[in-house]
Image (cartoon, helix red, strand yellow):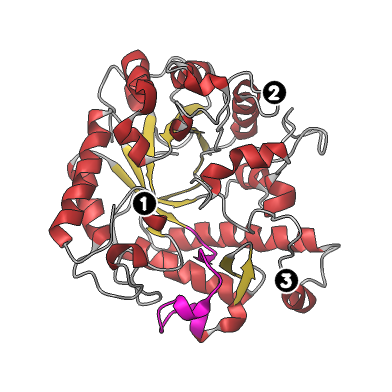
Amino acid sequence: MRGITRRGFGAAALGAGSLLLGAGARAGAGTPAGRELRGMWLATVAHLDWPSRPGPDRAAQQRELAALFDTAVERRLNAVFFQVRPTADALWPSPYEPWAECLTGVQGRDPGWDPLEFAVREAHRRGLELHAWFNPYRVANHTDPGRLAPEHPARRHPGWVLPYGGKLYYNPGLPEVRRFVQDAMLDAVRRYPVDGVHFDDYFYPYPVAGQAFHDDAAYEAYGADFANRGDWRRDNINLLIREMREGIARTGRRVRFGVSPFAVWRNAATDPHGSRTQAGVQTYDDLYADTRRWVREGWLDYIVPQVYWPLGFAAADYAELVPWWARTVAGTRVDLYIGEALYKAGRTAQPEAWRDPAELSRHVAFARRYPQVGGHVYFSTKDVVRDPLGALARVVEDHYGGAAARS
């Protein structure tokens, strides 16, 4: 997301059972294309996709959001991944966290309506799935706790929070933090008929050169049973994932749980089970997210690796990563969808392949060779709307000839 979140991170990283398909079913070769998942990420952090501006005009914000859903239908998509907890605040009346700043411009100010309720209703009315997208640990895109709402949990519990890389984060190593963020997220699952719970790739933060994540006290308190800090950090995130799945199950709701990680688990040079890539970031080692294990253990219902590089890209080839993930989910009941970098289409700062309007269409054609691939999700919604180079229109023309079904 252009320096705000993971979506703008790709170049730097390299330089240094479904409602649609049914559990275990796949939408690859031999499966009708109309049954595949076709989604878009709708980001609210920093007004990336919606709302375009904060303010008191409820009707204008509702019209704008409804228009984005209409565009999804026009593009023959069938799922929206709607960011409802962008910075430890909420797009619903949460008893745990303040109202999101993006709505009114003031964190904690009641917008006078319930955006999550409206989004679920309007998405379902159009035949779209609505997956509630949460960021578990990011607190703020700055380091000043005084800018948070007065009642913000990060201000009431300053020991929960660590500054790093110009941002504030909850400390994943504290059990009380893990319980709190799970409770805050599960509140939405209990109260709204969302189709999915969705995390992106922020667990421990992406590494920043020359900076340390100062979790020494938590490691001293809780890390004695681990050989090293890395193993302890990975266990903290494993617990988050496993316990979140268990918490969703306890709600009794039919809600799927998925994650969209940075696509490189580990390079093969680091681990023979890894992909033949040369990524400067590996989720296992740098974000402490053992995404491969989550799949093999069945802790997820679906995974959406962000394969944000073109076919033939030397450091991280789309044609290497899609088969690697297909092999990883094979024999499990975890559905695989591929995250696509629509936002890179036409950008001159990107590799030349992104200036070809047919690149994304080739991605879909390639991925359909693998029966484990059940669809694609596009980043982000504003690029679905403006469709740089007509790249998504090309995908629709070539591959989405029928309306995308929602069961």
The amino acid type found where label 1 is placed reads Arg
Q: Residue furthest left?
A: 59
Residue occupied by mark 3: 214
Q: Position of residue 311 (x, y in %)?
A: 59, 20
* 53 on left or right of 260: left
Please name the residue shown 62% across and 70% down the image: 163
The amino acid type found where label 2 is placed reads Ala
Q: Is residue 334 magenta?
A: no
- In the rendered view, would you say 229 is above or below 197? below
User: Helix or strand or loop: what does disc 1 sit on?
Assistant: loop
The amino acid type found where label 3 is placed reads His
Q: In the depicted view, which residue is nearer to us: 52 or 328?
A: 52
User: Helix or strand or loop: what does disc 3 sit on?
Assistant: loop
* 106 on left or right of 315: left
Please name the residue shown 23% across and 29% down the image: 74
Q: Where are the magenta residues, as a range?
A: 135-155
> Are discs 3 and 1 less than 8 Å apart at CB?
no
**Label annotation for residue 314:** 2
**Label annotation for residue 254:** 1
Q: Is residue 365 visible?
A: yes
